[in-house]
């Protein structure tokens, strides 16, 4: 079975119409992703979050918060100003910033978290998003960084894979 991005968005919409709220889902997704990252990297490492303005960015911030709680050194690169974040993403930013940064050695591996765009994104990366995507690629090659995407890698069409 192949599920399109539109079908996923429609399913999410129906779920929210039943009264399910976005925040518990974001917490569950972010904590699950953080746990998956820790399975690949059991010892605290360094991480850079690439944070979009929407809920994908909020997911990345939950991941960062959870990694910081476990001693990781985590910094965030934002696609816009704090005032441009959705209300929920702004709340997750405050929670992320409230947790002290870990002290992972600079010699530890670098992990990148791509939370710029999700399945709803269409067309080429514009403005600061393209610059941040290029920055991610530079880290991947210069530091052999491993990238984890929250929904789908930013800039990839979720239906065609292009």
Image (spheres, helix red, strand yellow):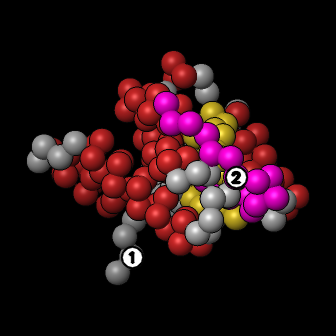
Measuring from the top left, give residue 43's x and y in whole percent.
Answer: 62, 65
Measuring from the top left, give residue 96's x and y in whole percent.
Answer: 50, 36
- Furthest toward the bottom, the residue is 1
77 vs 71, left or right, is right
For marks 1 and 2, give the CA distance: 40 Å
Residue that badge 1 annotates: 2
In this figure, what is the number of numbered marks? Answer: 2
Q: Is residue 88 above or below residue 105?
A: above
Question: Residue drawn at (28%, 43%), measured in percent from left and top?
Answer: 22
The residue range painted magenta reads 98-115
Residue that badge 2 annotates: 104
Q: Which mark is residue 66?
A: none
Which quadrant of the rendered structure holds the N terminus?
bottom left
- Furthest toward the left, the residue is 18
Residue 141: which quarter of the image? Answer: bottom right
Q: Secondary structure at mark 1?
A: loop
Residue 159 in view:
no
Measuring from the top left, give residue 107's x and y in whole percent.
Answer: 82, 58
Question: Residue drawn at (44%, 33%), measured in percent from left and top?
Answer: 95
Is 108 contained in the magenta span?
Answer: yes
Question: Residue drawn at (46%, 64%), measured in percent from left and top?
Answer: 35
Crowd rating for badge 2 (residues with CA inside 10 Å; few <14, some 14–19, many 20+): some
Q: Is residue 142 above or below residue 83?
A: below
């Amino acid at each position: 079975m192949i599920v399109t991005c539109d079908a996923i968005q429609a399913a999410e919409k129906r779920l929210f119409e039943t009264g399910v709220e976005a925040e518990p889902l974001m917490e569950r997704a972010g904590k699950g992703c953080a746990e998956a990252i820790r399975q690949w990297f059991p010892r605290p490492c360094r991480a850079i979050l690439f944070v979009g303005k929407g809920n994908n960015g909020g997911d990345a911030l939950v991941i960062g918060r959870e990694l910081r709680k476990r001693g990781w050194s985590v910094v965030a690169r934002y696609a816009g100003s704090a005032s441009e974040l959705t209300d929920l993403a702004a709340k997750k930013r405050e929670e992320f910033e409230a947790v002290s940064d870990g002290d992972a050695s600079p010699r530890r591996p670098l992990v990148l978290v791509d939370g710029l765009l999700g399945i709803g994104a269409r067309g080429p990366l514009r403005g600061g998003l393209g610059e941040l995507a290029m920055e991610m690629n530079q880290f991947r090659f210069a530091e052999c960084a491993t990238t984890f995407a929250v929904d789908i890698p930013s800039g990839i069409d979720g239906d065609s894979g292009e």
